[in-house]
């Protein structure tokens, strides 16, 4: 996919000068940075407001955005690393400047009224190009601890939309607007009956959905795999494990599943990725066991799903732990630090939660208190204020 070519490959139509748009969405790299943009794009389409997306060539957004028929343009991107690596020199001296130049050319052609940046390393070149061209910028921060791209981009933004009140004072107060984090509309459409039929589930058993994000989480994968007999004695599990050849987790889990007796084997489904079926999974899940990235956490809060969060340690500002503790303080989740994660501890935590259905129901209700159901329309309203 070349810069300026929507979708994969590019067609004759794609090579023509693109039509001007009102909003350019920029961001991606992960689902947490991509999902808010997709939710906003859906509302923009409903309101007949033209938008396009500038993203990376290989990030999550490069697949998910064209799937929704949103004009997509890929630019070269670097990566914002917080540790020393030789790649930092190349990215800062080559990738980022080339990305800014590519973004500037696209913005000149698309002539947007506003740029909506959702974060991630791909957003920063677009923000810098927009600032140079004097295009208004609105930034959206999904987590309680801002990412580096948004910290840098905030100085150029007219407004900074945040998911949670900016209690840490990370951004200039005059620019901050609390909008919440939007949920993709399709995730609200699942039903338990459809889940049972589509996924082949046992309606009499509680479902635990385990997810470690797109790449999977090895520590969670291995703990679940070692605890399978005990976990499956009282629940069924759908396990989104990723397909990382470096860890071999998927093959290892398949071998663990094959060694189970038949009644338990039927209760355990391994999937590398989850697509459209996620709405059905969420509709019937009794408990979500997950990392505490912005995307999964927002989905659980928006849908009222109780969660057992195992935050990824050593993230910037310990972002995932801050996210998870925020929900835990509201009563919507339980946090199990990775340093305390063992198969036995996992069985104990999950068993205690599944053994108290009333508590699970209360946790789900409390999780929703952190969600803003109309976050997508709030964000679109904020964007249109830039020209109305």
Image (cartoon, rainbow, N blue to C red):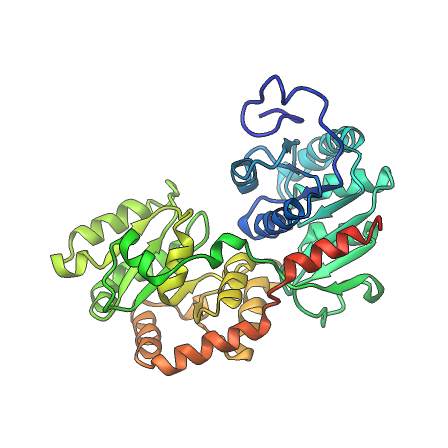
- In the image, 244: left or right of 51? left
- Asked whether 51 or 305 is in front, the reply is 51
Q: Quadrant of residue 195?
A: bottom left
Q: Residue at x 84, y 51 (%)?
A: 388
Q: Which residue appears farthest toward the top when viewing the image? A: 12
Residue 66 is left or right of residue 266, and the answer is: right
Residue name at image x 54 percent, y 53 percent: 184
State the image coordinates of residue 313 (x, y, percent, origin top left).
Answer: 51, 62
Number of labels in the image equals 0
Residue 261 appears in view = no
Say whether residue 267 is left or right of residue 94. left
Location of residue 297 with respect to 64 vertically, above or below: below
Front residue (pair 150, 252): 150
Q: Where is residue 197 drawn, in percent x and y?
A: 27, 54
- Closest to the observer, 175 or 320: 175
Residue 103 against residue 143 in the figure, above or below = above
Tell me where residue 355 sits by quadrant.
bottom left
| Image x and y of residue 60, in percent | 53, 42
Is 32 on the left-hand or right-hand side of 289? right
């Amino acid at each position: 996919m070349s810069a300026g070519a929507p979708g994969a490959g590019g067609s004759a139509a794609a090579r023509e000068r693109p039509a001007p748009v009102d909003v350019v969405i920029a961001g991606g790299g992960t689902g947490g940075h991509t999902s808010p943009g997709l939710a906003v794009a859906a509302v923009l389409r409903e309101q007949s407001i033209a938008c396009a997306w500038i993203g990376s060539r290989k990030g999550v957004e490069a697949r998910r955005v064209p799937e929704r028929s949103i004009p997509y343009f890929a630019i070269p991107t670097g990566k914002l690393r917080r540790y020393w690596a030789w790649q930092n020199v190349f990215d800062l001296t080559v990738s980022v400047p080339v990305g800014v130049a590519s973004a500037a050319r696209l913005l000149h052609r698309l002539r947007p009224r506003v740029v909506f940046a959702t974060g991630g390393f791909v957003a920063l070149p677009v923000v810098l190009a927009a600032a140079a061209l004097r295009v208004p910028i609105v930034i959206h921060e999904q987590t309680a601890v801002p990412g580096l791209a948004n910290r840098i981009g905030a100085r150029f933004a007219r407004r900074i939309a945040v998911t949670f009140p900016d209690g840490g004072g990370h951004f200039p107060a005059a620019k901050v607007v609390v909008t919440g984090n939007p949920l993709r509309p399709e995730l609200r459409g699942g039903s338990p009956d459809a889940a049972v039929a589509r996924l082949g589930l046992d309606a009499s058993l509680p479902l635990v959905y385990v997810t470690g994000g797109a790449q999977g989480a090895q520590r969670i994968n291995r703990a679940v795999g070692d605890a399978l007999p005990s976990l499956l004695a009282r629940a069924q599990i759908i396990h989104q494990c990723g397909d990382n050849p470096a860890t071999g987790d998927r093959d290892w889990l398949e071998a663990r599943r094959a060694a189970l007796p038949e009644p338990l084997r039927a209760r355990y489904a391994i999937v590398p990725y989850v697509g459209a079926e996620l709405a059905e999974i969420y509709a019937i899940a009794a408990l979500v066991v997950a990392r505490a990235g912005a995307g999964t956490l927002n989905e659980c809060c928006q849908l009222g799903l109780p969660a057992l969060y195992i935050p990824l340690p050593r993230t910037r500002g310990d972002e995932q732990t801050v996210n998870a503790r925020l929900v835990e303080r509201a009563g919507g989740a339980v946090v199990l630090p990775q340093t305390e994660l063992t198969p036995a501890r996992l069985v104990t935590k999950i068993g205690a939660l599944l053994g108290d259905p009333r508590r699970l129901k209360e946790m789900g209700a409390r999780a929703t208190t952190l969600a803003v159901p109309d976050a997508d329309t709030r964000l679109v309203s904020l964007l249109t204020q830039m020209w109305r």
